[in-house]
Amino acid sequence: MMEVMNTATRSSVKFQPFNLGRWLIWSLFALLLIVAPLVFNKGASLSLLCQMGTVMIFGLSYNMLLGQGGMLSFGHAVYSGLGAYFAIHAMNMVTAGQFALPVTLIPLVGGIFGMLFGVLFGYVITKKSGTTFSMITLGIVELVSACSLMFPDFFGGEGGISTNRVIGAPVMGISYGPQIQVYYLIAFWLFIATVGMYAFTQTPLGRIINAVRDNPERVEFIGYDTHWVRYMVVILSAFFAGISGGLAAINFEIVTAENVSAIRSGAILLFTFIGGIGFFFGPLIGAVIGVFLTVLLSDFTKAWQLYLGVFFIVIVMYAPGGVASILMMNVRLLKYHRFHRVWRSMAGMVGATLLVCLGVVMMVEMLYHLTLNAANGPQMQRFGQVIDTSAALPWIVAFALAAIGALLFWRIKPIFRHAWDGANIEIEEQLRKEGA
């Protein structure tokens, strides 16, 4: 009998080799978080990095619903916003001496309360799927947004709730007064949350939510309750969204009604889709692009919303897999040694696109100046030059740049398409031979 048991035990043991590639990626990610503020240390770079970190966690939590579960939510800001409100109230209570909690753990307060509201709202919204689910989430975010003005004692009205993140005596020299200390706090929680959300994708629940996304009828046929699967994923997603809200409360030291608004929910939808909902790292890329377009670009031009909208439309039309899909397709060419087939025509396409963008941006900026800043005179300063928007020459130059770029794009596009299709066909044939 013992011999049979030993045989069964030996047969159940499987050898799993050390995944060097995965450890290398996570180590590089951690190293990137550590050295980022040392490289980008000019002006407001540190503040931008902090915002990117919180938005990365927010985007990854949202992608648990949209990318992994196929649940298009218009109300995800409810969980991050309410988590931020409870986190900032907790900071004020610590300041008042009502209870003791280090600032390092404040994001966990946001995560716990975000999860509690995920338990509350999630049971209702996951009763339905598809368009009905989306409409219910939109109703939830409008409900909470209205409550933020109806209950000023908790939400602070239009002015919001403010706090001071420097609480008590410094611990090991850390007071979270300097922005660099706040950055490394955000980086720490970003790394932990990213590891946790990636680990979720490898769990049975993470696998079954993919099946619910692709074929809910078959999932129910094999005995799973799709409502409870979606419900549990909403709860976990709300937890990580609450962590991002808690970090945002520490970073900005203020939480307002905008944190629970539909506008914020729509913004994270745009960022996540731009990055790529089909890839785990897509929201990380989307957060970088989104913060750049909404924060940095808005300091230079009043037309930043136009550029964001156009960029989103282009991504949806020509790269529905997001920026991550473009990167992965080129990595595939590099892996199979076919990138040399396309890089020249690709460089030409990129150059032509930049010419078109330059010409269009010039025309948009001049038009905005004429319509919104006419009282300041016809001259504006862009690209390091003073441009007279009332003169014909700048308009001719802008139109010529856009026209030349469009012509080059039209001429190079067939060449690029031929090289791109040929390289991918060769890769498919190689894979077919290796599989055979």
Image (cartoon, rainbow, N blue to C red):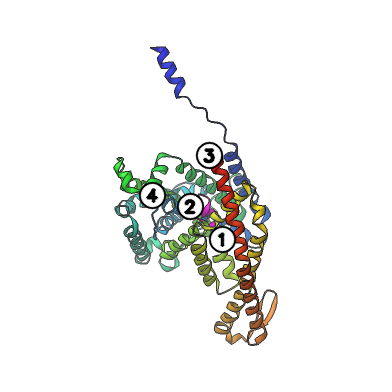
From what the image shows, is residue 81 above or below residue 337? below
Tag 3–tag 4 contact (CB < 8 Å): no
Q: Secondary structure at mark 2?
A: loop
Sooner in the amino-acid sequence: mark 2 or mark 1:
2
Amino acid carrying label 2: it is Gly
Is 111 on the left-hand or right-hand side of 412? left
Above or below, comparing residue 94 to residue 14 in the picture: below
Using a 10 Å C-alpha cutoff, classify the residue at mark 2 as few (fewer than 14 neighbours), some (14 to 19) or many (20 or more).
some
Instruction: Point out residue 238 in the picture as x, y percentages from the top left corner.
Output: 41, 51
Of the image marks 3 and 4, the number of the one nearer the N terminus: 4
Residue that carries the numbered disc 4 in the rendered image:
214
**Secondary structure of the residue carrying numbered label 1:** helix
Residue type of the residue flagged with mark 3: Gly
Q: Is residue 69 magenta?
A: no
Direction from residue 156 to residue 288 in the image, left or right: right
Task: Say the numbered circle drawn on residue 311.
Answer: none
Res 293 quadrant in image: bottom right
N-term-proximal mark, 1 vs 4: 4
CB-based contact (under 8 Å), mark 2 and mark 4: no
Q: Which residues are magenta?
A: 276-286
Q: Nearer the viewer, residue 144 or 220?
A: 220
The residue tagged with tag 3: helix, strand or loop?
A: helix
Residue 23 place in picture, x, y as percent? 59, 39
Q: CA distance from mark 1 to mark 4?
A: 29 Å
